[in-house]
Amino acid sequence: MMKNTRKLMTGPVILALATGLYGLYPAMAQDRPIEGKQGLGKLPNVRPAGMNTPTPSPSASPSASPSPRPTGGPSPRPVPTLLPTPSATPSGTPSPYPTPSPSPGATPVQEAVVNWSVADAGDLLAAIMAIGDEGLFPADYQPDALRAAIKAGAGDALDQQASKSFAWLVEDLRDGRTPMTARVQWFAVDPDQDDNPTTALMQRATTNHDVPGTLAGLAPTYPDYAALKEALAATPKAQTKLRDAIRINMDRWRWLPRDLGPVYLITNVPEFQLRLAVNGRNIRTYRTIVGKPGRTATPQLAEKVEAVVFNPTWTVPQSIVVGEGLGQQLLARPRAGYKVTRMEDGSLQVVQQPGNTNSLGRMKIDMPNPHAIYLHDTPSKKLFDAQVRAFSHGCIRTDRAVELGMTMAILGAGMSQEDAVATFEAGKYKKVPMTRTFPVYLTYVTYGRDINGTLASFNDLYGRDGPVLDSFRAPRALHTTQRKSNEEVIKLDNPL
């Protein structure tokens, strides 16, 4: 085992650590604000919007937009496909989850009104008419009403309309156009509206007379967004299905933080791949196994790696201990590798002990969250050879998880390579807390760059494209205070 384990941590991994990761330590201090994302602070000369709650106007109809709404019509050429669509989970399969309703406490967002000059409002109108380049729809931001207000000159009407159009445009560029009710199983809270609030952005744009620059600073910095934007510009309008796929996934990048951080893990569920990235560049990639469609589908999360567990134990869920009778079976016929304990209330607790046959494998990467989702090793390595790898109960089984866990321990806990290897080879449970945490993003991208950097489509495994596309076909919905899906949190703690 010693020889094989040392092989895991040599060559490209150590080279990546030495040249690409260790030098980032000063920028990775926990809770340090990411450069460019600090709040803009309190700014003066802002008028409250009062009771003028924004409402969509008739001018926001699809036909008024130079950039046509998605039609879902046939495409003259097929979308490039990386993975075949399995017959058991065809693309476009309705989601097993009902479309969520708005949170009971969610209310429409109301932004303040500021003073607008005719020149700044003209720049805003020009930005709106060109917003199709970002995969959005000009008609959503009431260009006709803004044009009329500009023609009438400076005054209250211009202030009201320009502030409304700007606020809606900022919300969609920064946070995404898709309403929360169409983001199925989306539990990743985007902090961008806290870091760069709309009113502060509006005040900055009008004070500095730089509407284009303020809006341009909202685009996601993740490289895939720029690649999708270029692809949208190069795709003929007749290619409706491809353009729809690009728009859907451009918007998904806006649902995440604009800047993902200097070092992070990101997995694309439909691609069955995990990336360890530094400054947007992939250092290592890992094949994954994700949740089966249905109640065990993997939700979308943005969490932090807070610990790695060498040689983990697995506490068997009561659904198996009681529901499948495992507890009583083990009492009658003890099995090597399992420890059974009768608790004070009379229930049985079954804990699988560390080892090569443990359901979590030899490594667990802990990212505490209400869904009990984490990254982990598996003894069933052959499953990574399958092309469609949706076999789990929600957690992300990760190929070469021991290598990844050791990398996290070296980077986040200051372990030496020798200590990491020795801890693994000891074969005993060892939880190593991170002194520097790492963001980990569980995303759902159905069109984007694959691990080789080539744009490709991925099977819509859980049928989550449909609600997004439907929301694009409808008039823009008012943004609310809801920050994530209010669907049931399903605790997916069974790695089998």
Image (cartoon, helix red, strand yellow):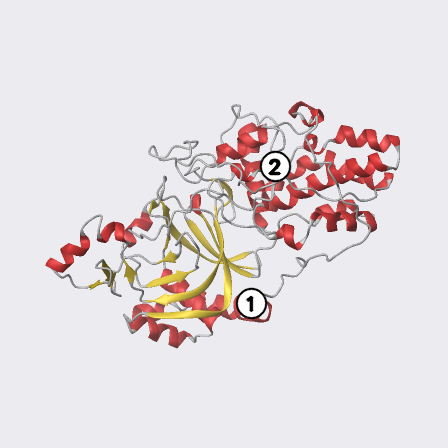
Is residue 447 visible from the viewing direction of this image? yes
Quadrant of residue 408 within the rendered picture: bottom left
Q: Dot 2: what SS?
A: helix
Q: Amino acid at mark 1?
A: Gln
The residue where tag 2 is placed is 232
User: Which label sits on residue 294?
Assistant: none
Residue drawn 63% across the image and 51% down it: 192
Asked if labels 1 and 2 touch by Cβ distance under 8 angstroms, the answer is no
Q: Amino acid at mark 2?
A: Leu
- Residue occupying the far right of the picture: 153
Q: Dot 1: what SS?
A: loop
478 or 405: nearer the viewer = 478
**Side (left or right) of 364 relative to 316:** right
Residue drawn 43% across the image and 75% down it: 415
Is residue 357 visible from the viewing direction of this image? no
- Could you tell me how far apart the alpha carbons at marks 2 and 1 are, in whole angstroms? 37 Å
Residue 143 x/y as whole percent: 75, 31
User: Which label sits on residue 30?
Assistant: 1
Residue 142 x/y as whole percent: 73, 31
11 or 338: nearer the viewer = 338
Image: 17 above or below 41 = below
Image: 433 above or below 255 = below
**Side (left or right) of 53 relative to 90:** right
Decide which of tag 2 and tag 1 comes sooner along the chain.
1
